[in-house]
Structure formats: structure tokens, C-alpha cells
Amino acid sequence: MMRTRANPRKGVFVLPNLLTTAAMFSGFFALIKSVEGDYALASVAVLVALVFDGLDGRVARLINAETDFGAEYDSISDVIAFGLAPAVLTHQWALGPFGNVGWLGGFLFTACAGLRLARFNTQSAVKDKRYFQGLPAPAAAATLVTWVLFVEETGLTGVWVNVAALFGVYALALLMVSNIRFRSFKDADLRHRVPFPAAVLIVGVLILVAIHPPLVLFGFFFLYALAGPVDTMRQLRHKRHQRRERTKVDSQGPEQ
């Protein structure tokens, strides 16, 4: 994501902004296919946008081409690809029977994605780089569309599929604007050696993805969205335990 504001240079660099345009095009393509009823292809288009969105910022940093224009353009692209596109897709696919509750859920998801991106931009200079504040919009969008793709590929049916989609839209929207922290993995150094078991685990994950991509991808993004609240509750319990211990020590007073 091209969101670094430290470089004041003006102008437009072709390559990173071309990748951002590709992400926006993928989001727009997903919108068209959602209206046409090709939900599986629309889901894949959002995932393709996710790849382009991950590349544009890295390419910009690699060639020293970070600009304010690129950051703003990237935000607009993200709102379309990871806010509007998955919301329309999910509404067309499963939320229609819920009436106003359904389309309002889609709007809430879109609005929260925009708010999440705006907050990210304004806090980019002061936040802890190891964590995101709130669920990132691309991860929220990927959780929705991989659920759609999984159901479409496996042929699952039933009211519970629609209910799960409705719950997911509202829950993911609120997670995006929450203060819950999610790991960014920006502190991971891929240039160093890794233990042999870790290398075997990576190979195993790739094999699982090859066997059933929709299931594995949905599982990955669902667990990532779940990890933030779980880790936050664990930290809160740990802090409460520390406070109780300090209170207990203070109440006992100094040793005589």
C-alpha cells in the first residue's frame, strides 16, 4: 500500500500507479460480475486486486517512488476494490432476502472500509508499525469473498449460508473501525534463515492451498480476523491479572 507521507515529491510515477490502477480495475470488474451474477469470478477479481494492492506499495518503495499522489490514489482504489466491490458482491449473492437490513449491512461495510483507510492515513506517522489498528480493509474484503468462493465451489446451500454472510458483513465492518490490534507482519525479516520445521510447514501450507484453494484461503483470512479479538482478550486478562496481583501486594503492606 502506498501510504507513506514522508516523501514530499510531486509528480506521478508510472509503474506503482499502474499497479494501483490494476487493483481498481479488478474491483470494478468484480462489481460488474456481481451484477451479472457471476459471483465466483467476482470473488477472484477481488483477490486479484489484493495482489496488485500488495505490489504497488512495495514497488514504490523499491524504486523510491513514494508520493502523496500515490498514497491518495491508493486509498481511492482500496475503497472501490475492498469496500464497495465486496459489499455489492455479498449483497447480490446473499443479503437480498434480508431487505433493508441486508443492503444497510453492505453500506456499513463500505463506509467502515473508507473510515478505516482514512484513519490509517492520518495515523501512519505515529502508529506502531508491527500492528494495524482495526482489521485492514483488504483482509476484511478477502474474508468475505473467500467465503463466497468457498460456498460457490462446494455447492453449499441453506438459510444458514445467508445468515453467515449477513453476520460476517456487520462483524467485519465493526472490526475495521475498532481499536483492536492486528499483526501487520511488517517486522518479519524474510532475508534471514528459518528453522527447518518452518520450511516444512510452508511447503505443507502450499500443498493445502493447491488441494482446495477456496477452503484454505477462507480459513487463513477467517483465522486472521479472529486472531485480533482473541489476542486482545488474552492481553486484557493478563493486565487484569497483573492489576489484581499489584492490589494484593499493596493491601498486604510492607513486610514488618
Image (cartoon, rainbow, N blue to C red):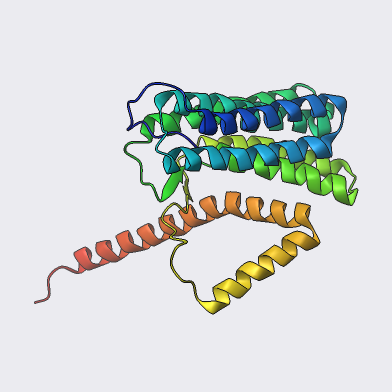
Q: Position of residue 216 (x, y in %)?
A: 72, 57
* Coordinates of residue 182 in the picture (x, y in percent): 49, 49
| Pick the front one: 9 or 215 | 9
Can residue 171 be spotted in the picture?
A: no
Q: If the image is split into quadrants, where does the C terminus sit?
A: bottom left
Determine which quarter of the picture holds residue 19: top right
Q: Is residue 125 left or right of residue 23?
A: left
Residue closer to the observer: 246 or 226: 226
Q: Is residue 173 above or below residue 202?
A: above
Q: Residue sitting at 49 percent across and 72 percent down?
A: 194
Q: Residue at x 33, y 31 (%)?
A: 7
Quick check: 103 above or below 236?
above
Q: Is residue 150 left or right of residue 178?
A: right
In the picture, measured across the screen, residue 90 lies left or right of residue 245, that is: right
Front residue (pair 17, 5): 17
Q: Can you tell which quarter of the image residue 46 is in?
A: top right
Residue 89 showing in the rendered view:
yes
Give the percent coordinates (x, y) of residue 212: 79, 58
Quarter occupied by residue 132: top left
Residue 252, placed above or below residue 78: below
Left or right of residue 74: residue 90? right
Q: Residue at x 50, y 76 (%)?
A: 195
Determine whether 76 is above or below 243 in the image: above
* Residue at x 46%, y 28% (from the top left corner): 71
x, y percentage for residue 91?
77, 29
Residue that extends furthest to the left in the rendered view of this protein:
256
Viewer-proximal residue among 76 and 87: 76
